[in-house]
Structures are given as structure tokens and as C-alpha cells.
Image (cartoon, helix red, strand yellow):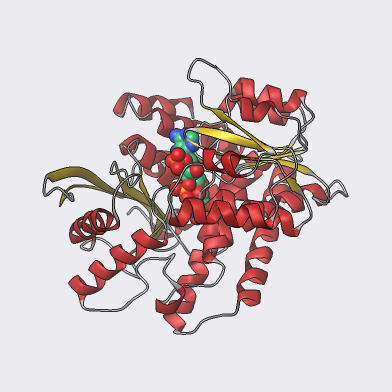
Amino acid sequence: MSDIIQIVKSKDPTEKEFHQAVGEVMESVKPVLDRNPEYGNAKILERLVEPERVILFRVPWLDDQGTIQVNRGFRIEMSSAIGPYKGGLRFHPSVNLGILKFLAFEQVFKNALTTLPMGGGKGGSDFDPKGKSDNEVMRFCQSFMCELFRYIGPNTDVPAGDIGVGGREIGYLFGMYKKLRNEFTGVLTGKSLNWGGSLIRPEATGYGCVYFAAEMLATKNKSLEGATCLVSGSGNVAQYTVEKLLDMKAKVLSLSDSSGYIYDESGIDREKLEFVKTLKTIKRGRIKEYADKYPTAVYTPVDPALDYNPLWRHKADCAFPSATQNEVNAKDAQNLVDNGIKVVSEGANMPTVPEGVDIFIDKGILYGPGKAANAGGVSVSGLEMTQNSMRLSWTREEVDNRLRMIMQSIHKTSLDTAEQYGKPGNYVVGANIAGFVKVVDAMMDQGLV
Ligand code: NDP
């Protein structure tokens, strides 16, 4: 097992997020490998850490001044063992191969947990949509799709959104795909409702993450009613996490973006949430404007000199990290524990560093890792694919019920698997092993491909 991490590190020494994701899964699945020596003989680990295909391409586009800009585009097709590659596209200046490989690797096991037939992939670009006009974003998306269309398709690879890719970007990407292929198919998920999207898809990751937290609390005969909650981020996942927490009568105290965070001691109610949705999705403004509008809130800008995030120093019952990877460091985890946190449910992918995860687990916190807790988004993407191929649309209630059932199933599978491997209550081990076994057994069945 340590051999495989050494191999990964020596092959791609700079991809530290990928090393982190591989290390975490390998640590969890050690007992499975011990019980199943045939996996070792089949070089399963060596095959799993190598993407089936990596596509890297040039994305040239014209900005509003008529100047040529060049970005880099990527698609990592990680595993098709249990279905077509499936996973989001991220547009953010920090995007590089290592980050996308970590996300694609996580996606493989997450998708296996959903019970739907989806392989794992991820893609994106170092393009930054922030501060760009709609026309610039459209020209970029069109150029990106002019290359990507060769590799994707409704039965091959079905991308979706992620950081920096929402409904607007999916629309522009789909438009160009349709023009190039001359066919209307469910090649992307997260589409608008009137041309093939699914009800509840925008809400799914946030709602699912709250359903997962509710399931964890139910194991202790508790609920979210009256619970105080810290949420980070203010994008798609954060907004719908807040919405579902309000449905469950919890009190939400915070939101953030990459410039800083707001803490609202009187709680974020539905009217304030609507303000945030408009601010972030339509006006594309900054979270600071929340504190300008609501005097009960205090805005704290990011202080790069600090080695902790003050957002995680507030007292609360539950934390929902919903911004980005490694946003909760070991100090943050300790601060949360010292202030009595009971539940951490991850909307973002890998938001907690490994030392932080250890702290949560050692202290017996109900800790739902992103791979399990944020799987609601890809689950409803899977349901969108199903509706597209059946050429029908389910109602809001139908999709929400299915989402809730899938989150309950992911929770139960993770809990039961952890118990079976002697780690009761450890959702990290449970989720990693359950996802891993499903993918690996499919690989064994399909021979050396
Ligand atoms: P959005 O682009 O809608 O929102 C991202 C939010 O996170 C913004 O508030 C953004 O602030 C903040 N953020 C991004 N990068 C950083 C950073 N380096 N430091 C601090 N804040 C940052 O993305 P989503 O809400 O879709 O995604 C959030 C997380 O959830 C990601 O980890 C994503 O991988 C994960 N996820 C998303 C799913 C989905 O369905 N969308 C599914 C499963 C997981 P700013 O505006 O300043 O950039």
C-alpha cells in the first residue's frame, strides 16, 4: 500500500492534492486488500491511480477588447468500470492536473456509492469567470467545447458543473456541443429546466449534504431542529445547504467567499438567503455586501497572516464546509472541536486536511466526508441522465424523494461497511471501502482493460 503512494509520488511529484486523495483511500482500504490477495495480483491499485485517459488542450478566445487570450483545458477520464465517465468541470485560476486528478479519483468512489451506474471523471480550465462579461464567458465556453466535444457523449462521458461552472456556463457549453454534433442529447447535466434539466439538480448537493447530516444525527436520536450551523462558501452548494437547513429549522450563522466571511448572529433567514442568491448568481458580487445590507452581520476579510480561518472559531453545533479543498486545517478542526462542534458534513470536495480528519474522528465527531455527504449532486445528475434517455421529466417531489433515499442509502452503506470492518461510526473508512469494492469487483469481472 505504501508502495503505491511512493509510485504515485515519484511519477507525479508536484500533484500534492492527488497524493492526499490517494493516501486517504489507500489507508482505508488496507483491510480489504489483506482479505483479497487477488486484487494485488491483478495490480488493481496500480490501475486505479492511472487515469484511463487524460485530455489536455489549448483554449484560445477573444476578450471584449479584441485581445487573444489562451487558457488550458483538461478532461480526466479516470474510470469507466461501472458506467460512463461522470464528474464536473471546474473553471478557476488554481486548476491544474493534480487538482483535477484528485477530484476525478474521489469522483470514482463517490459515484459508486450513489448506487447509480456512473464512472468517474473531472475536467475544467484555469480560466477565471470572475470579472468576465457574459460574452467573454460564452466565447470561452464555445472554444472549450470545440475541442472537448470529440471525447464526450451521453454514453461515454457526461460532464456537469463545479466551481465557476453553473447554469450559464452549462448553457453555452451545451449550445456549442449541439451545433458541432447536430444532435440533442443529454451530454451535460445541470441543464436548464426547459431544455432537458432536472428539477432539484441545482439544489441537490446542498440538500443532500443536509440530509446526510440529519441521518448522522439520527443515529444519536438527535435532529437539526434548533441546531446552530456554520456554512462556508456562498456558491451553489452553500446556498442550497442554507435553504435545506432552514427547512429543518436550524439556525445558520455564516457564509464566505475567497475574500472573507460574514457572521450573522441573528441567523440567515429566507429573505437574506434570497439576497445572497441574487448577489452571487445574478449580480456576481462579493459576500461583503451582505454585511453592508444587514447590520446584524459582521464581515471579516481574509487575513493571509493567520494560520487558521476565524470562521471556524465560532461556536456552533454543526459545520458545513462548502467552498473548496483544504479549507479546514488542523487548527481549524481543533478550534471547532474545542467549541463543541457535534457534526461536520462536507459539501465541498476534500475540504478538511488529513490531520483535521483525524482530530474529528478521534474526538468522536459525526464526520461525513465529502465523498459521501456531497454525493447528492452527482446522484441527481444521474437522475437527469435517466430522465433524458427516457425523454420525460419527474416532478420536484419525485426527484427530491429519490435524492433523500439515495442519501439515506449512502449513509447506511457507509455506516454498515465501517461496522463490518471494525471501525463503527467511521464514515471515512465505510465510504472508501464500499465505493472501492464496487469499482474493483467490476474491474475484476471485466478483465485486463
Ligand atoms: P461555486 O463556484 O458555486 O461556489 C464556490 C464558492 O467557494 C464561492 O463562494 C467561492 O468564492 C468559494 N471559493 C472557491 N475557491 C475558494 C478558495 N480557494 N478559498 C475560499 N473560497 C473559495 O461552486 P460550488 O458551490 O459548486 O462548489 C463548492 C464546492 O463543492 C467545491 O469543492 C466543489 O467541488 C464541491 N461540489 C460541488 C458540487 C456541485 O454540484 N456543484 C457537487 C459536489 C461537490 P469566490 O466567489 O470568491 O470564488
Give percent across and percent down for residue 311: 63, 30
Give the quarter of the image for residue 406: bottom right
Q: Is residue 440 visible?
A: no
Give percent across and percent down for residue 401: 67, 71
**Residue located at (70% from left, 23% from top):** 335
Residue reaching furthest to the top: 305
Height in image: 281 above or below 329? below
Give the quarter of the image for residue 184: bottom left
Give the quarter of the image for residue 265: top right
Give percent across and percent down for residue 192: 43, 71
Closer to the camera in the image, 398 or 415: 398
Q: Is residue 226 visible?
A: yes
Height in image: 174 above or below 135? below
**Residue located at (61% from left, 43% from top):** 346
Instruction: Name the side, left or right, on which 374 lies relative to 175.
Output: right
Instruction: Name the side, left or right, on which 115 lies relative to 407.
Output: left
Quadrant holding the C terminus: bottom left
Closer to the camera in the image, 361 or 44: 361
Give percent across and percent down for residue 246: 72, 55
